[in-house]
Amino acid sequence: MSRALFDPITLRGVEIRNRIWIPPMCQYSVDAQDGVPTDWHLMHLGSLARGGAGAVIVEATGVVPEGRISPQDLGLWNDTQRDGFRRITDLIHSQGATAGIQLGHAGRKASTWRAWGVRPEGNVPPEHGGWQPVGPSPVAFPGLAIPTELDSAGIRGVVEAFAAAARRAVEAGFDLLELHGAHGYLLHEFLSPLSNHRTDEYGGTLENRARLLLEVTDAVRDEVGEDVPLIMRLSATDWSEGGWTPEETEQVSAWLGEHGVDLISVSSGGNVADAVIPVGPGYQLAFATAVKGRTGLPVAAVGMIDEPFQAEQIVALGQADVVLVGRESLRDPNFPIRAAEALRYRMPYKPAQYERAYR
Ligand SMILES: Cc1cc2nc3c(=O)[nH]c(=O)nc-3n(C[C@H](O)[C@H](O)[C@H](O)COP(=O)(O)O)c2cc1C
């Protein structure tokens, strides 16, 4: 039986075998703190590719050292890191999946403790590999350091770092690139009036707050050329009075389309510590559908999409073009195979070695 969830999708000539993709998920597993991928990343990402996902998108990867969320994050600011990613893209490709990577700068939410194990309060001090974070304005995320305001040279450096990391990602064999414009990290911090109090051309009006996002997009597109699909991840809302809104997300998504972004990945939140978020199955889906309707761009939906029929319905009804399955993929890296079985779809790339498990 044919199923919308398992139809391939093509972005700029890159065909992705189905619509169940793995969203970026930080592993905080670079114990050497040098940004170079480890055996953990290889095994983790390889098993997700083996499980039948269409694209596997590597976790938020810092474009500069101070752009990492934690000292244990991946990085792509040097060629040693680039070369370390090659075995990961090779392994993902060997399992028939498309390799993507999320490039990010954590801004005022950088230099935090990794999200598992011992987690003291506040920022990571220098003796544990921490650093002073930067941001659009000297406005702290609650519980974290006041960031140093980026000046125009600093902003230029961020733009150039995204472009250089994008080039290295392509050299490392990644087929598609995602830019992290969500979750209260640097690009989102510029977008939201709650974190951006600037009075120069990067603050104030929506055009000004979106300027850095569009400059990064243009620089990355210039650097990698026309053949590489670009995804932008946005938080559709801050879920907070006076914050970033779904309407602004739709407008900026339309601009991103004009600037050569191929797909918008629609998440939410992350810029406000005490936001009340109505979490539940598909709780962010309507934002993705609205962006698709407004822009005509393909969109990815994310957030508690955990059930095969739920995922199929989202794609079949055209509510989104792709579903991102995060935590459920950590619980079961073979979720796409399981979904195919549940939907009675004969998955041509189900590993023959596992055939007996599904008889
Ligand atoms: C362990 C973990 C790490 C995450 N790291 C990232 C990340 O690096 N970049 C990002 O944009 N989102 C990150 N997220 C958010 C996920 O990509 C996803 O949007 C979120 O988990 C909601 O989807 P789900 O309900 O399917 O898990 C992370 C989530 C988890 C659970």
Image (cartoon, rainbow, N blue to C red):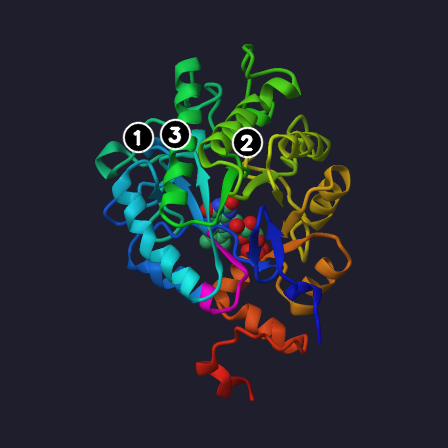
Q: Look at label 2 and name its amino acid.
A: His
Image: 63 above or below 342 = above
Magenta run includes residue 272: no
Magenta run includes residue 56: yes
142 horizontally vs 171: left or right: right
Which sits in the foreground, 114 or 339?
339
The residue indicated by pointer 3 is: 161
The residue indicated by pointer 2 is: 188
Which tag, 1 or 2, sits closer to the chain's start?
1
Question: Which secondary structure lies at badge 1?
Answer: loop
Measured as percent of width and height from the top left, residue 292 is found at 73, 43
Q: Residue at x 44, y 67 (%)?
A: 95
Image: 90 above or below 263 = below
Measured as percent of width and height from the top left, residue 353 is found at 44, 82
In the current view of this chain or complex, which residue is farthest to the top?
Answer: 200
Residue range of the region highlighted in magenta in the rendering? 49-57
- Point out the image quarter for the N terminus: bottom right
Mark 2 burial class by Cα count in 10 Å: few <14, some 14-19, many 20+: many
Mark 3 burial class by Cα count in 10 Å: few <14, some 14-19, many 20+: many
Q: Look at label 3 and name its amino acid.
A: Ala
Question: Which secondary structure lies at badge 2?
Answer: helix
Which tag, 2 or 3, sits closer to the chain's start?
3
The residue indicated by pointer 1 is: 131
Number of marks in the rendered image = 3
> Residue 236 — which label?
none
